[in-house]
Amino acid sequence: MTSTTFPKGFLWGGATAANQLEGAYNEGGKGLSIFDMVSFVPKEERGKDIEMDVKSEEELNALLEETGKTNFPKRRGIDFYHRYKEDIALFAEMGFKTFRLSISWPRIFPNGDEQTPNEEGLAFYDRVFDELQEHGIEPLVTLSHYEMPLHLVQKYNGWADRRLVDFFVHYAETVFNRYKDKVKYWLTFNEINISMFSPYIGSGILVDRLEHKEQAVYQALHHQFVASAKAVKACHEIIPGSQIGCMLARMESYPETCSPDDVQAALDEDQKNLFFTDVQVRGYYPGFMKRYFKENNIEIEMLPGDKDILLEHTVDFLSFSYYMSIVASGNPDKAKEKGNFSLGIKNPYLEASDWGWQIDPKGLRITLNKMYDRYQVPLFIVENGLGAYDVVEEDGSINDDYRIDYLQAHIEQMGEAIKDGVELMGYTSWGCIDLISASTSEMSKRYGFIYVDQDDYGNGTLERRKKKSFDWYKNVIATNGEEL
Ligand code: BG6
């Protein structure tokens, strides 16, 4: 790879989310968030369903009562709330140009529907952004990363209710105004398509309250699209020169064979996935989705002006997470071997992580090209990485060569895509410091360059320790991707 592959100013860094990192779930005036209610999934129970969902009122109430009895790792995170200075110093040592974090909505508005923000919450992020600034690290801030205030679920059934649009926009405007001199890069909703798998995590919806679940989820998503577009508008007005993007869990679909039925199945899967970015980047609902709504008895209620808002306030860039590709078959009767948990069928050409996520670096180049061809806006990979069990050797070292191999192969393919002409703004690998897993709440599913001494039950000193990949990534950044 030539030294000119990655553009000057390429935003190398790492990514995190408040709910998996901060801990201090009941400090500083913070309200409960949806993920504070999701408990640990032991290995033997993993993969039965999308583990992070809460489906009913009954289930939620039981979880609320169980406080103290159940293992809720996201409530303790890795204590970034108190240790952010140490952690940011380590990111700076690696040479991070950017650090992706989210603001916990209930730290700012504990209930979500009040008018006055919680000053203690705002002050916390001031301290974090100041610390980043001191180290020359540009923050990349997600407004909503599965952290909706729980009260909005209980009172409104989350995004199923149109009133959420105003609550979210008020929250967004509050943080834009507060941090306008500190934060230039923003994202609206993390993995906005996650609601298709988990309506609770993606949209704060308890599905047992609904008659027509699919209708409600798409209606909620419409509200989120409108809220996102309004946030884009506000961001541009309040912070001149800012850039704000959408965020998709990208699932590149391959046909199982070259049979036209398989190719059609792969196209269907791909369209299901790209529907979200079609709305957020192009600014309108695509035809294939209108057909789907019609054939499935789904009617999206739109207010006058919604279509204009979507069209006029599209995002500046498209960000996405990339962990895997999927395989689609046109034969519904075919016995299917599971691929990535319940997504798609198994790809015999790929290896999988210990959690069954199929590893596909070349798919990253393919997907970058495909999305750039379709949208012609800058792309930003804001999550990618290998969840793995790490071993601390007797001498204290952690030799995570498997992680280096994974990241190296993916970064190499990013370079190829850039050479293909794709405009790529940056790369923030997921969980740059070990944190709590989103899907299983395990601590032992580690992604970081920095090891955190804590187990699945919260035992440990929380001491931070550099892994072998720490120095490797430091050199990648120092050479702007020239040395992998
Ligand atoms: C993405 C999420 O889906 O994948 C992150 O945006 C999450 O929050 C990441 O942590 C990896 O998933 P997991 O389940 O391994 O933590």
Image (cartoon, grey):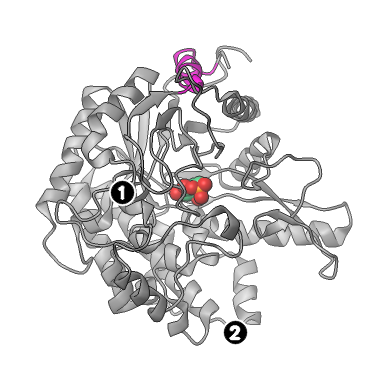
Identity of the residue furthest to the front in this view: 394
Residue at 23% in and 27% down: 133
Report x, y in % for residue 102. Answer: 33, 46
Mark 2 vs mark 1, foreground winner is 1
- In this rendered view, identify the residue nearer to me: 74 or 251: 74
Residue at 77% in and 61% down: 265
Q: Which residues are magenta?
A: 467-481
- In this rendered view, identify the residue nearer to me: 163 or 443: 443
**Considering the numbered disc 1 on the image, is that residue within a helix, a strand or a loop?**
helix
Is the residue 79 above or below the residue 114 in the image? above
Quarter of the image for the N terminus: give it: top right
Q: Are marks 2 and 1 in contact (CB under 8 Å)?
A: no
Of the numbered discs in the image, which one, if any, rests on residue 183? Answer: none
Report x, y in % for residue 458. Answer: 36, 46
Residue 239, visible in the rendered structure: yes
Residue type for callout 1: Arg
Report x, y in % for residue 193. Answer: 51, 59
Report x, y in % for residue 251. Answer: 62, 51
Image quarter of residue 174: bottom left
Q: CA distance from mark 2 to mark 1?
A: 43 Å
Residue underneath mark 1? 76
Residue 53 drawn in magenta: no
Earlier-in-chain disc, 2 versus 1: 1
Of the numbered discs in the image, which one, if any, rests on residue 297? Answer: 2
Q: Main secondary structure of the magenta part?
A: helix
Residue 307, visible in the rendered structure: no
Disc 2 CB within 8 Å of nearest ligand 1 atom: no
Residue type for callout 2: Asn
Please rate how many residues cluster around mark 1, counting C-alpha atoms within 10 Å: few if below 14, some from 14 to 19, many from 20.
many
Residue at 43% in and 84% down: 209
Is the residue 161 above or below the residue 228 in the image? below
